[in-house]
Image (cartoon, rainbow, N blue to C red):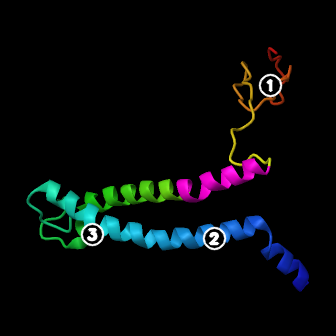
């Protein structure tokens, strides 16, 4: 039983995922600091006269932070997501694809080609199919 667990842990895929997760979590703190300390002040400064925690509007007169529509935080979250996903792609996915290509394996490749049925418009047909598997209509080859 322990041997099976050891074999599972020592598989290459598990190691790659574990390393990727650790790198992603560490990088997450860096991106959070960047968006909180650089992007948010820039967005707040773009608003001009700031009447709240950032770019946005107070929905209720005299309301607190609970009724403040904070667009700056939303824009910051979008920027955070884009930066984070770009780093994950270029630091983890792209090198992994390259290593697997050198080993002769295709990962994260294009999906296989498909064909669309003219009758029911299902788009998951085999390119060599002559009949639709959903409605039974004839499909041009």
Q: Which residue is mark 2?
A: 19
Q: Which residue is mark 1?
A: 127
* Mark in front: 3 vs 1: 3
The outermost residue toward the bottom is 2
Residue at the image point whose x is 58% and y is 73% from the top: 22
* Segment tinted magenta in the rendering: 89-103
The answer to whether marks 1 and 2 mark residues whose Cβ atoms lie closer than 8 Å is no
Query: Considering only vertical position in the picture, is 47 above or below 25?
Result: above
Q: Which residue occupies the foreground of this view, 118 or 73?
A: 73
Q: Which residue occupies the foreground of this view, 102 or 138?
A: 102
Q: Is residue 91 magenta?
A: yes
**How many residues crowd around disc 1 within 10 Å: few (fewer than 14), some, or many (20 or more)?**
some
Q: CA distance from mark 1 to mark 2?
A: 39 Å
The answer to whether residue 58 is seen in the rendering is no
Q: Which residue is mark 3?
A: 37
Residue at the image point whose x is 27% and y is 61% from the top: 39
**How many residues crowd around disc 3 within 10 Å: few (fewer than 14), some, or many (20 or more)?**
few
Q: Quadrant of residue 11?
A: bottom right
**How many residues crowd around disc 2 within 10 Å: few (fewer than 14), some, or many (20 or more)?**
few
Q: Earlier in the sequence, mark 3 or mark 1?
A: 3
Secondary structure of residue under mark 2: helix
Residue at the image point whose x is 75% and y is 35% from the top: 112
């Amino acid at each position: 039983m322990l041997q099976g667990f050891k074999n599972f842990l020592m598989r290459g895929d598990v190691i790659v995922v574990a390393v990727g997760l650790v790198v992603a979590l560490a990088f997450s703190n860096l991106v959070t600091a960047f968006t909180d300390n650089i992007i948010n002040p820039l967005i707040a400064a773009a608003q001009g006269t700031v009447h709240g925690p950032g770019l946005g509007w107070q929905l209720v007169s005299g309301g607190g932070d609970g009724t403040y529509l904070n667009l700056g935080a939303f824009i910051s979250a979008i920027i955070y997501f884009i930066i984070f996903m770009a780093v994950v792609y270029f630091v983890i996915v792209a090198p992994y694809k390259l290593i697997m290509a050198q080993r002769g394996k295709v990962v994260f490749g294009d999906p296989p080609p498909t064909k669309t049925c003219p009758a029911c418009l299902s788009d998951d047909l085999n390119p060599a199919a002559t009949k639709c598997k959903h409605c039974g209509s004839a499909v041009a080859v």
